[in-house]
Image: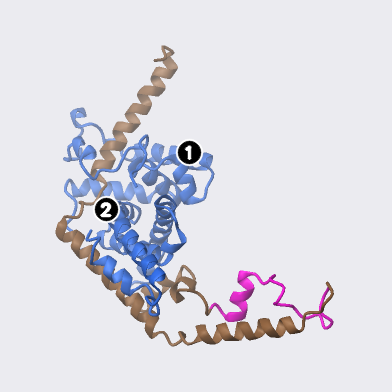
Chain colours: A blue, B brown
Amino acid sequence: MDAGGGLAEVAARGAGPDAGVDAREATGEADLERRFAAFVGSHRERARRLAWRLVGGDAGAAEDVAQDAFLRAWRSLDRFRGEASLSTWFYRILVRQAANHRRWRGVRERMGGWGNPDAAGDPPPRGDPGLRERIGRAMESLTRRQREVFVLVHLEGFTVRETAMLLGRPEGTVKSHLHRALARLRRDLSDLREPDGGVAGAPDVEPAAAGAPGAAPRAHEEPKP
Amino acid sequence: VSENPRHLDAARAADDDVRWTERLDAVWRPEPLDAAGRARFDARLRERLDGAADRRRRSPLRWLAPVATAAAVALAVWGGARTPTQDGPLADGGVSLADGGVTDWEWDLLLGGALAEDDAAALPEEYDAIASVFLE
């Protein structure tokens, strides 16, 4: 992230047409710009990955959702003093944007003829595409809340408490969704086991990749800001 | 470590869940962006920020903010002039704006949301989704 220019510079231009005469105001805006550039740099990858998982593996849609959430973050940046409160709010927005996207994608598909406006520009993930498709279908079979809770806690490493805050639901409800989601996915994807289990169709991605740099923290770990 | 077989079973099951979830996590994830991908992402975000700022500058409703502010001040002064000296309702049952009791939503109602810092932020959350269907 080019914190010195780039987005910071654009953020300055986007800050408001009448801004800049007052020195204190300018200093405040410069601070906002730096915060925003740093925020995008810190959360770009995680936001994109979370969106990708929530919208069902569509790279183009995931980028749209992540960018929409960043745009909203920029508009509301000055309302948040601390990074922690901003990131909580940001992921809440992102989860909601992803849900909106799924809803409207359903409408577009039903209406037909609209095509898929989300042209994925990124290379497809490595591994077995058939397996990914099966996982995608299994994820689709979950309810919205089950899917969100499972992805946030088990795949993105948010704690149950954080997830409850993000979704505005009691912790007990989150745990309940989590339990049902895991049970259902384990039933639907029962052959997703360790490679030494010798299961046909097992993914060709080494387990070590889960701990690779950039990998999501586990459920028992605190997510990195 | 508990010797209770039920606890051991539960621990084994939990470990199994964790391993299974790790396998899923390894497969069900997008490729991380490389340097070029990050640059492309940032450039697009930059473009959208620019576009949002331009739209705000070109908005035909921008003139409303100063006008609405002046109108609000005028209303407040007018309301203040009509405030009775004693506590209690106005003689004609009108609403006083000068007693500091005007809430944010009342201002929004009075000013039609024209003082909102960002026009887009004042729109319903579904607007972006609707716009993406009908305007793109």
**Residue name at image x 43 percent, y 46 percent:** A146
In the visual, does A181 lie left or right of B86? Answer: left
The residue lying toward the viewer, choosing from A129 and A4, is: A4
Q: In x, y percent, where is residue A153? A: 39, 42
Q: In x, y percent, where is residue A44? A: 28, 56
Quarter in which the C terminus of chain B is drawn: bottom left
* SS at badge 1: helix
Query: Residue B104: within the magenta?
Result: yes
The residue lying toward the viewer, choosing from A175 and A92, is: A92
- Give the mark toward the camera: 1 or 2: 2
In the visual, does A75 lie left or right of A129? Answer: right
Q: In x, y percent, where is residue B62? A: 45, 84
In the visual, does A196 lie left or right of A104? Answer: left
Q: In x, y percent, where is residue A37? A: 29, 60
Q: Amino acid at mark 2?
A: Glu
Q: Residues within 10 Å of mark 1 (few under 14, many from 20)?
A: some
In the visual, does B83 lie left or right of A214? Answer: right
